[in-house]
Image (cartoon, rainbow, N blue to C red):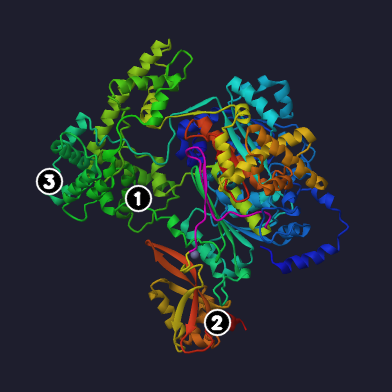
Amino acid sequence: MAEPKIKYDRQLRIWGEQGQAALEKASVCLLNCGPTGSETLKNLVLGGIGSITVVDGSKVEVGDLGNNFMVDETSLGESKAKCVCAFLQELNDAVKATFIEEFPEKLIESNPSFFSQFTLVIATQLVEDKMLKLDRICREANVMIVFARSYGLTGLVRVSVKEHTVIESKPDHFLDDHRLNNPWPELKRFVESIDVNVPDPVAHKHIPYVVILVKMAEEWAQSHGGTLPSTREEKNELKDLLTSRMIGLDEDNYKEAVDAYYKLFSSRGISSDLMQILNDNCAEIDSNSSDFWVMVAALKEFVALEGGGEVPLEGSIPDMTSSTEQYVNLQKVYQAKAEADFLAMEKHVQNSLKKIGRDPNSISKMTIKVFCKNTRKLKVCRYRMIQEEFNSPSLSVLQNYLTDEKYSMAAGFYILLRAVDRFAANYNSFPGQFDGEIDEDISRLKTLAVSLLTDLGCNGSILSEDLIKEICRFGAAELHAVSALIGGIASQEVIKLITKQFTPMIGTFIFNGIDQKSKLMLL
Amino acid sequence: MHTDSDILELEDAAQTCTDVPMVESTANSRTRDLDRLLLRSGHLVGPNFEPSVELRDYLQEYARVLVVGAGGLGCELLKDLALSGFKNLDVIDMDRIEVTNLNRQFLFRLEDVGKPKAEVAAKRVMERVSGVNIVPHFCRIEDKDIDFYNDFIIIVLGLDSVEARSYINSVACSFLEYDEKDNPKEETVKPMVDGGTEGFKGHARVIVPGMTPCFECTIWLFPPQVKFPLCTLAETPRTAAHCIEYAHLIKWDEVHSGKAFDPDDPEDMQWVYKEALKRAELFGIPGVTYSLTQGVVKNIIPAIASTNAIISAACSLETLKIVSGCSKTLSNYLTYNGVEGLHTEVTDFVKDNDCIVCGPGVLIEMDTSCTLQKFIEQLEEHPNLHLSKVSVTHQGKNLYMQAPPVLEEMTRSNLSLALFDLMGRISGGTVHVNGTSIKNNKKTSGLRKLRVVFKGVDGMADMDTAGGA
Ligand SMILES: [Zn+2]
């Protein structure tokens, strides 16, 4: 089985074996397989998702040949679900691909329990009232949903999950936890064992900057009543002291120390984001708690006891100018502390599990280890029900979006995408769907959009006339390029949700295909 | 960007078949969805937008689009453009299909491994989208004549290398001419749309030479890759990557005298891995794996299907909008980041007016007696150019060509002639030179536009038109 591993090499470098295993276990359902839906699935099938079920009741028409790559002439008159499913299967035979020739709207109305078998449902091109119903069904069955819709040059993506917790959020830029201003005894001892004033210039320029900074901070504290610099003057003074110790201009280690100097003043203890998680109601665990919250409960105890206000040490250090020996030894000091912290955490996890009546070894060592390496990066994402957002969006935020020059177009699309569904409910077609009725549709849509805004408590006149006309011009077209873009974003969110890595989007993503100034609306 | 004369011709052609009803063309046709944008007037559209059946025909019959690269972005671009109304596409790529492409390059199957990407990609899209014609070019981008690139209305780039982007940019900008007031002549503007991805991140940008910054104007967006200092590799290795690069860059040459390392040969890679492992054990450094060895040696950039789909779709949409005017366009640089939530940002970068690639051209003042040979030597020493191995053309005429040998021989005798005479004894004009320059220890080939002015000759103001008259 070497070949699949090679095939997935470029993505394994992003989400690893664990992430890949999660994908291969997942079962995903697609509702409607127009270009938006089929492009979403394509990206998942290529990546090796476990199984897909394509649900669509329509037959392939000539118009579909112009916007959907997964149907061709031979598909005309056939079930669209069947044709799309066959093409997707061709892309990756490791995926279990099935289809159901049925209109999703019908399933939502008549067979709500159908959805509970899936890990995640990708719902495309649904109108508002079906969205709301499906959202309720899946929320109750604890099934994740990603809504995706393309509409002319606009569209949306919206995730709906009750709660999504992430251990490996893998942020791009995150300050390393080096404890430079709060060294533990072993690090102190290691630093003391190194003579930073060593006369040999080669040795001098190979002292790791971590050692230099800890030493300088210590020296400063000793002559300043045990405290670190707090004012700008004091900080500059320490910096000058640091540069004065350079004995050659080519000392990269000292340059690194000056660059990393600000780390001496990084705040100690727990960040406000993490504090919020530790104080979350879910951190009061019971037998229904997930592994994530059990570990958070254990973390809380660790911070209060062994941690002395700090989380477990991650234990990794970046590359820095150093002799091999000193670097390797320094690395060992950090790793040893991380290992000790892990062992303490493991005890707390076991105790927590016992307390709630679970097998104390039911969370694996590896999971706890990964948790310990990521405690500062934990994420908890909670999503409002669509109905709540639609009935009572955050008004001030919406008003701000609508008046912010940079994003007023995306915000306008948000409102108009809702208005077109009201239009469809009233007139049985989308505005501008038929060539002869555009002018009439424009005024009808405007009335609906203004009343929608007024109902919400916003100023209705804020909507631009041009935007209303554009939406009518779109006539509910599903353009391939827009669908591929919306589908691409939807699949990326699906991957993040299923692998439980990285942070999924929160809010409703509104695509603006006019000038690409899209917006994530948190309402 | 269609010109008015194109439209006029098309209108004449359309007159002959006016009895075809409009309804048929929208309700039940392949262009059902696209027609909404191309046939209906809009309110947030490009300045020259004229919705019409002729416009749609123009896209389908006349507009030729070049896709550079048939990899992760290129496969998506070909599909997206073929389903966005374009029927005449060319694709150029020098690579062959590898197993590691299959997680995202959806036009390729396991049995295609080893075949040229451009050829398989073109074939697959033509099989599925009838009426589309895609011409594949299985070669290096530098292998094509400059004129080849001038045949396209727009160039779309799906590349993963800075050098290749820089080259295509220099070619597209070389077509640009300025009028006497230093304003770009519209008919010489060759727009480009460029995309790039890395993991969950990517960018899409629109380059309209002379109007928006070209690739070179904002080259700082692509900082050169940092290399490990050799002394670290040799004396103080600390990380697994140091051990790998030691085996790859130092140990390999010590052991294999003269034999070049081949990153695509699994045996060579295995050798580097084993040596790296030995070194890591010697120094007590953890973390050397075969996968990391490949990653470091080949500088592998992680890539996934979804990000490629997003960026290619954005590029294709911009291509459609630029060519048809059916909507406003991106101005001019979009970044996408899906790592933490979702962030998109549009930045309006400004053009560098002194850019040697998209500007009016580097000014070179010369004596009328200066020979072509002397001129070529000057370019090597020129502080902004540093061009060596230079070929010179003037108004499409080869004055001197380095290659192929036949052309070199044919043009060699020009070297001893005065450039002033070769250019037809005019006061000055635009000369194109193609050569290699060294940047960050890397050889790059590029096309440069030079404004040659001869000292003591009258009529300097209208030098461009003087040559054409
Ligand atoms: Zn430029």
Q: Quadrant of the C terminus of chain B?
A: bottom right
| x and y percentages locating residue B21 in the rendered image | 86, 53
Q: Chain of mark 3?
A: A
> Label 2, on which residue?
B463
Cβ atoms under marks 3 and 1 closer than 8 Å: no
Tally the marks: 3
| x and y percentages locating residue A296 in the rendered image | 40, 22
> Label 1, on which residue?
B248
Q: Amino acid at mark 3?
A: Val
Q: Amino acid at mark 1?
A: His
**Distance CA(mark 2)–CA(mark 3):** 68 Å
> Along the line of sight, which residue is nearer the eye, A262 or B247?
A262
Q: Which residues are magenta?
A: B325-351
Residue B316 relative to residue B446: left or right: right
> Label 3, on which residue?
A198
Residue A371 relative to residue A114: left or right: left
Asked whether residue A79 is in view, the answer is no
Q: Is residue A273 above or below residue B404?
A: above
| x and y percentages locating residue A366 in the rendered image | 39, 25
Q: Secondary structure at mark 3?
A: loop
> Reading the chain from its start, which is encountered first: label 2 or label 1?
1
